[in-house]
Image: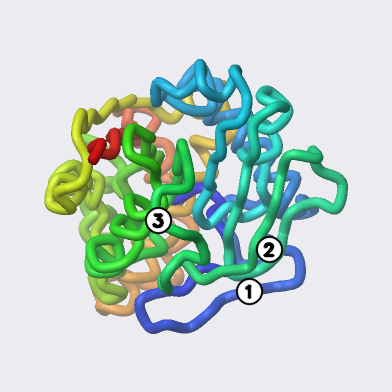
Amino acid sequence: MGITPSKSRRGSNNSTTSDDDGAEGDPFIQQGQSYIEKSQEQQHFLRAIWDGNFVSPVREPLSAGGAKVLDVCCGSGVWLCDNATDFQNSKFVGIDIVQRLPNERPRNVEFIVADALQRFPFDDDCFDFVYLQFVTLWFTEQQLIETILPECVRVLKPGGWFELSDCDAHLYTKGQLGTILNIYFAQQLKKRNFNAFVGNHLEFFLQNTGKVQKIQKRELELTIPNLNVFGNGMGDIACKMFAQIGINSGIELGVLKESDAEKITVDSMREAHERRAYFKFYRVIAEKISS
């Protein structure tokens, strides 16, 4: 599942989705919350579960100053601004197809309008650290393999680090109802050419570029109650979203009735708590090979 990624990324049909504040239609945005407000909440959540904004060994060069960092599909720029405040002598650049950064931001933050599915507007070997998060529900495997990952590596300096943060679009559960809804959810993703478990292949995709080494993957498994503690009800929000998408898919297939949707949602959330269902978060890092 992707947690409030940029609402302006292009999908597999090359259509662009956008809205006035980035919040409309996003299942993780609660009523009355702006896109930036929710992005800030989710940034605090990710920073808490990973004990920092990144796991790559780049703290020393960022602290020393003069380093250059790229955030691909930066959305509201919360990750950028958070790090720019921590490392004021390094430069942080974000790209996305729509400008959503706040007007007031650290002086060492720059935003450039760019489509991640096109060649990035940078020369080769110009960033010390390239960061990307939440690709599962926004990019197909083909887009990752053919454009996004190669571009991330291209603009990275030899010896620089790439990091991707995401989570599987799957609720890990032993409950019968949750298992069924997972099947329906997977079918919905398949229609859009998305892979719920693309994280299982990222190490292989990076290795196939032939330009990175020291590839590592770190995983975290968080139950619904754990997520609620870290992320202000994030677990219940995510669980409800999964249930609703699975139910809608079941209705389209003709195996569920719309009149049963509310009851199924409530029952599935109760089951998720009782059976200690969990979501799997991961980070993949790699160093660009020196020439």
Report if residue 1 is visible in the image: no
Instruction: Tell whether label 1 touches label 2 (CB within 8 Å).
Output: yes
> Dividing the picture into quarters, in which one does residue 7 lie?
bottom right
Q: Position of residue 226 (x, y in %)?
A: 46, 22
Q: Which residue is denoted by mark 1 in the rendering?
A: 18
231 to the left or right of 34:
left
254 shown above or below 65: below
Furthest-right residue in this view? 104
Q: Amino acid at mark 2?
A: Gly
Q: Amino acid at mark 3?
A: Asp
Q: Amino acid at mark 1?
A: Ser
Q: Which residue is denoted by mark 2 in the rendering?
A: 22
53 shown above or below 153: above
* Dot 3 or dot 2, earlier in sequence: 2
Q: Secondary structure at mark 2?
A: loop
Residue sitting nearer the eye, 154 or 232: 154
Name the residue located 46 percent from the left edge and 59 percent from the top edge: 123
Q: Which residue is denoted by mark 3 in the rendering?
A: 124
60 shown above or below 198: above
Q: Position of residue 221 (x, y in %)?
A: 32, 26
Q: Viewer-nearest of labels 3 and 2?
A: 3
Of the 4 image quadrants, the one containing the C terminus is: top left
